[in-house]
Image: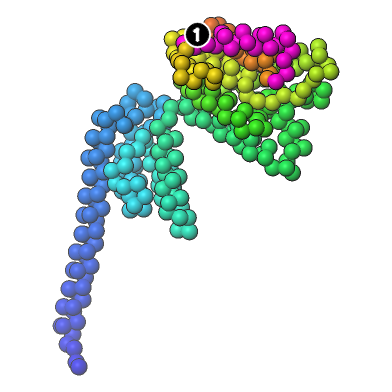
């Protein structure tokens, strides 16, 4: 069948117009989606679920709405979390975008689970993130203890024995737990009280405080061990550092309530309960009880109390001094130019 040249041209024009119309329709749909997300985002900004403004830096948030709208309007992201999903900032949106773009062989439910963890992580304060990171490190070390082939390495690296001459284990042993119950008790204490203390300090200050407390409490136990050489027992655990955190929390919030293990349904003011625990550890240290690290507990608790009373102000003075020196140096450099 013969087709005239005019008919071909008409068909080409019709096809071109149809493709252009479809492209315009797709572009309009994407624009509507983006505008809808931006509108919803403006509503979220006014709600309690949004962490901009005053708390922007604390949560790592960014006010770059355009980039966030582009990321969240991606079809893969929308299929993962929905177009109306609340985000705390640009970093959160980028994380969800990376999760949505994981390879297709990764199961969708796995992506959804990872996205849920990302949502939780991005709503934590910097102090809470620091505390959960320490807890995660403790969990990793606990898992390593369960691997038989690693036991010699773990005993050398994550257990402190005064007779070996290895000083670095004073620090590494404070992340180490062999039994699940030991890890569980210390982690509950760290998470329960650590967030309060970490939020009262900067992340850098809390990290230095926690590591120092772990090492110093271990050192106190180390120094007293030679006094009873026949009873030297290698030590491990975060108890000394956790006691320091609880002591600091008591100083910062003396009216807060806690429940002891043997009295779980009786809330007691921390200002009464914690001194009682320290008295118990003092008795254990004097009598030489070996079941728990009473010397490390007592040292850590007293260190936490002392640090809040005197150390935090010293840290603040040090920070001000460093900032003043930096400002002075910057001013001199600008004058020199």
| 232 on left or right of 200 | right
Is residue 320 shown above or below 39? above
Q: Which residue sits at x=15%, y=83%? A: 6
**Residue 70 drawn at (x, y percent):** 32, 46
Which of the 4 image quarters holds residue 217?
top right
Q: Which residue sits at x=25%, y=30%? A: 46
Q: Residues within 10 Å of mark 1 (few under 14, many from 20)?
A: some
Q: Secondary structure at mark 1?
A: helix
| 84 on left or right of 142 | left
Badge count: 1
> Residue 313 magenta-drawn?
no
Res. 74 visible in picture:
no
**Residue 207 drawn at (x, y percent):** 56, 23
> Residue 272 magenta-drawn?
yes
Q: Which residue sits at x=33%, y=50%? A: 78
Question: Mark 1 sits on what residue?
Answer: 271
Is residue 149 shown above or below 10? above
Q: Which residue sits at x=41%, y=42%? A: 116
Res. 63 visible in picture:
yes
Q: Give the residues in magenta.
A: 269-291
């Amino acid at each position: 069948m013969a087709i005239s040249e005019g008919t071909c041209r008409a068909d080409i024009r019709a096809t071109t117009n149809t493709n252009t119309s479809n492209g315009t329709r797709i572009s309009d749909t994407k624009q509507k989606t983006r505008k809808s997300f931006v509108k919803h985002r403006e509503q979220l900004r006014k709600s309690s679920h949004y962490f901009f403004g005053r708390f922007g830096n604390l949560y790592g948030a960014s006010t770059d709405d355009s980039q966030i709208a582009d990321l969240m309007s991606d079809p893969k992201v929308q299929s993962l979390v929905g177009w109306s999903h609340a985000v705390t900032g640009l970093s959160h949106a980028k994380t969800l975008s990376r999760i949505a773009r994981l390879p297709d062989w990764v199961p969708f439910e796995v992506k959804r689970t990872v996205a849920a963890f990302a949502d939780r992580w991005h709503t934590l304060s910097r102090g809470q993130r620091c505390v959960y990171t320490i807890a995660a490190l403790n969990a990793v070390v606990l898992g390593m203890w369960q691997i038989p082939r690693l036991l010699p390495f773990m005993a050398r690296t994550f257990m402190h024995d005064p007779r070996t001459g290895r000083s670095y284990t004073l620090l590494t042993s404070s992340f180490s737990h062999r039994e699940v119950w030991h890890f569980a008790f210390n982690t509950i204490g760290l998470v329960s009280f650590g967030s309060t203390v970490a939020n009262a300090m900067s992340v850098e200050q809390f990290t230095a405080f926690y590591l120092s407390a772990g090492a110093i409490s271990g050192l106190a136990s180390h120094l007293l061990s030679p006094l009873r050489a026949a009873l030297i027992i290698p030590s491990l655990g975060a108890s000394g550092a956790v006691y320091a955190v609880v002591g600091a929390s008591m100083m910062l919030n003396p009216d807060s309530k806690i429940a002891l293990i043997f009295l779980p349904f009786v809330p007691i003011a921390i200002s009464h309960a914690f001194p009682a625990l320290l008295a118990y550890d003092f008795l254990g240290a004097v009598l030489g009880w070996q079941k728990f690290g009473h010397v490390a507990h007592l040292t850590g608790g007293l260190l936490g109390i002392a640090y809040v009373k005197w150390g935090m102000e010293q840290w603040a003075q040090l920070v001000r001094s460093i900032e003043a020196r930096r400002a002075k140096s910057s001013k001199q450099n600008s004058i020199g130019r």
